[in-house]
Image: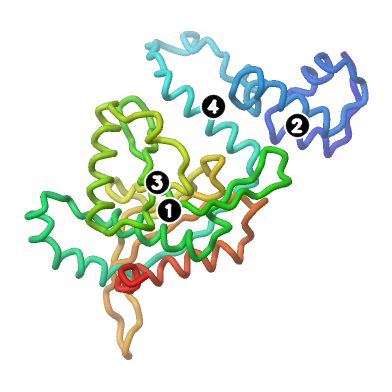
Amino acid sequence: MTYIASPSVRSYAGRNGVDLDAVAAASGRRNLAKEDVDRHLSRDVSDTGASAAVSHGNRYWDVDHTLHGPVSDEPVSRMAQVAADNLSAANAHIPQVTHHDRADIRKVEAFRSKLTEEALDRGIKLTTLAFHVKALSACLKAFPKFNSSLSADGQTLHMKTYVHVGIAVDTPAGLMVPVVRDADRKGLWQIASDITDLAGRAQARKIRPDEMGGASMSISNLGGIGGTAFTPIVNPPEVAILGITRTETIAVWENESFVPVPMVPLDLSYDHRVINGADAARFLKHYAGLLADPRRLLIG
């Protein structure tokens, strides 16, 4: 079917992976507007439970690879398929921006080192991730807009009074995000215990569905693997996500000389419909300040 669409509509459809031929055929309309593209996306989301943002572009993946050489096929797990659909929807519909910063963790590591013997006595593995969860829970209290969700129609901001922190766990079956509940009310030992328990059961696929939903905000920690920075995708209905990569030693000018300082890179992705750049910068500055002086985590 022939149709008319302005350059802006064509660009909008392209960014969302929508085939305007399909929009024209489905709608029966000749003059296509941005609203027609939105209706097409909404219809596909409601029909499939996943985003149509890339569905019409799938023809680019529909290739007979055996024409170019030998291949072997490996089925994609159901969990990985669901995750892919959710990530595609999030990436298509959220105007996402990532703010990068880093935090001095000298005092965190020194404090954690002092607690090594007590951790052994308690049978708890106290990692820096527990400090990150505690710092994030404090920031969510200090910056309540980050602890919110935007309604589907974009007209209401649901402000949450609870503070639950999701922890992304890489499992053989795919990415899972169990949640540390009421992190703002828990001490480091309880948070560390929760992280170990939840991550272990996620790896064993023994996590319950009710332990994976309702996070205020999530953490994606790649510090144990490597990297210097990345752009984590916001996990709706959350409005932000914190990425962490491997700690690096940076030369910092202090007291008339350079000193080696362990710094952890921080990557904060956020929904720009709810959070602006200044909010994100202040949030990470506050976060870095808490890690630089972990006593502030203990006194609130």
Give x and y (percent) for residue 36.
Answer: 82, 28
- What residue type is disc 2 on? Ala
Picture colour scheme: rainbow
Task: Kindly state the secondary structure of the residue where label 2 is placed.
Answer: helix
For residue 176, side relative to residue 237 (left or right): left
Q: Residue at x 33, y 35 (%)?
A: 170
158 to 280, vertically: above or below? above
Closer to us: 8 or 287: 287
Q: Earlier in the sequence, mark 2 or mark 1?
A: 2
Q: Which mark is residue 220?
A: 3
In contact (CB < 8 Å): disc 1 and disc 3? no
Quarter holding the N terminus is top right
In contact (CB < 8 Å): disc 3 and disc 2? no
Q: Quadrant of residue 195?
A: top left
How far is the residue under mark 4 from the one under mark 1?
Answer: 24 Å
How far is the residue under mark 4 from the one under mark 2?
Answer: 19 Å
Label 1 crowd bin: few (<14), some (14–19), many (20+), radius 10 Å = some
Quarter holding the C terminus is bottom left
Task: Kindly state the secondary structure of the residue where label 4 is placed.
Answer: helix
In contact (CB < 8 Å): disc 4 and disc 1? no
259 to 174, vertically: above or below? below
Task: Kindly state the secondary structure of the residue where label 3 is placed.
Answer: strand
Q: Earlier in the sequence, mark 3 or mark 2?
A: 2
- What residue type is disc 4 on? Asp
- What residue type is disc 3 on? Ser
Task: Kindly state the secondary structure of the residue where label 1 is placed.
Answer: loop
Q: Which mark is residue 229?
A: 1
The residue beneath circle 2 is 13
Give x and y (percent) for residue 221.
Answer: 35, 48
Q: Residue at x 53, y 63 (%)?
A: 143
For residue 221, side relative to residue 273 (left or right): left
